[in-house]
Image: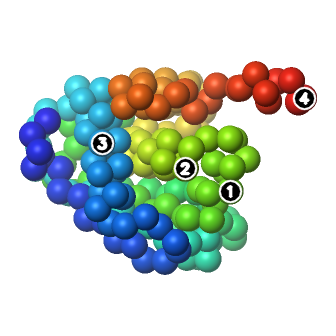
Amino acid sequence: MSDNAIHIDITIEAGSWPDETTLEGLVRKSVEAAWANLGLKDADSELSVVFTDDASIQELNAEWRGKDKPTNVLSFPAFPVKAGAQPGPMLGDIVIARETVEREAVEEDKPLDHHLSHLVVHGFLHLLGYDHETDEEAEEMEHREREILHAIAIPDPYAVSEETINND
């Protein structure tokens, strides 16, 4: 994928996030790994990633999903895409909530940047038509996430650590 194939618009709307340059590097690395893994052709595409807080994402979650609680990531595809198909130029928006991401990273004993990369990949796959409504869809999506994250040296986010097993 050429350096200019995906134009990424980063917006820090709310919350205590790293600087925009750091976030753009993390997002670009994650998105380009996903693009390569999916075997998509180079395209002049646009993606928006909004970094916000729990209050803002809770409003979006209530409005668009009928769930009045914060979540870690929401995706808003610009156009419907069938999983595995070549997307159009406008990919859509990914919205990520700081407090939820940070809390989950601590609970799961993961570095924040690893968890954030996972959520970027997860949200990006949603923009590209992947979902996890059925067990089969969830297996496919998780398999893709594992492969993509492995390509950027991030451990399997679904693996259960020995410490977790011993504490059960």
**How many numbered badges does the structure rendering display?**
4
Q: Provide the residue designation for mark 3.
A: 29
Tag 1's secondary structure? helix
Tag 2's secondary structure? helix
Compared to residue 92, the image places residue 120 above or below, namely above
Q: Quadrant of residue 93?
A: bottom left
Judged left or right of residue 165, residue 145 is: left
Compared to residue 5, the image places residue 22 above or below, namely below
Asked whether the viewer can see residue 60, the reply is no
**Quarter occupied by the C terminus:** top right
Identity, as a three-letter code, of the amino acid under mark 3: Lys
Identity, as a three-letter code, of the amino acid under mark 4: Asp
Q: Provide the residue designation for mark 1.
A: 103
**Discs 2, 1 touching: Cβ within 8 Å:** no
**Spatial distance from mark 2 to mark 3, Cα to Cα?**
15 Å
Q: Please tell me which residue lies in front, 80 or 45.
A: 45
Identity, as a three-letter code, of the amino acid under mark 1: Arg
**In the image, what residue occupies the spot 35% across and 41% down?**
30
**In the image, what residue occupies the spot 47% across and 67% down?**
17
Q: Residues within 10 Å of mark 3 (few under 14, many from 20)?
A: some
Which coloring applies here?
rainbow
Q: Provide the residue designation for mark 4.
A: 168
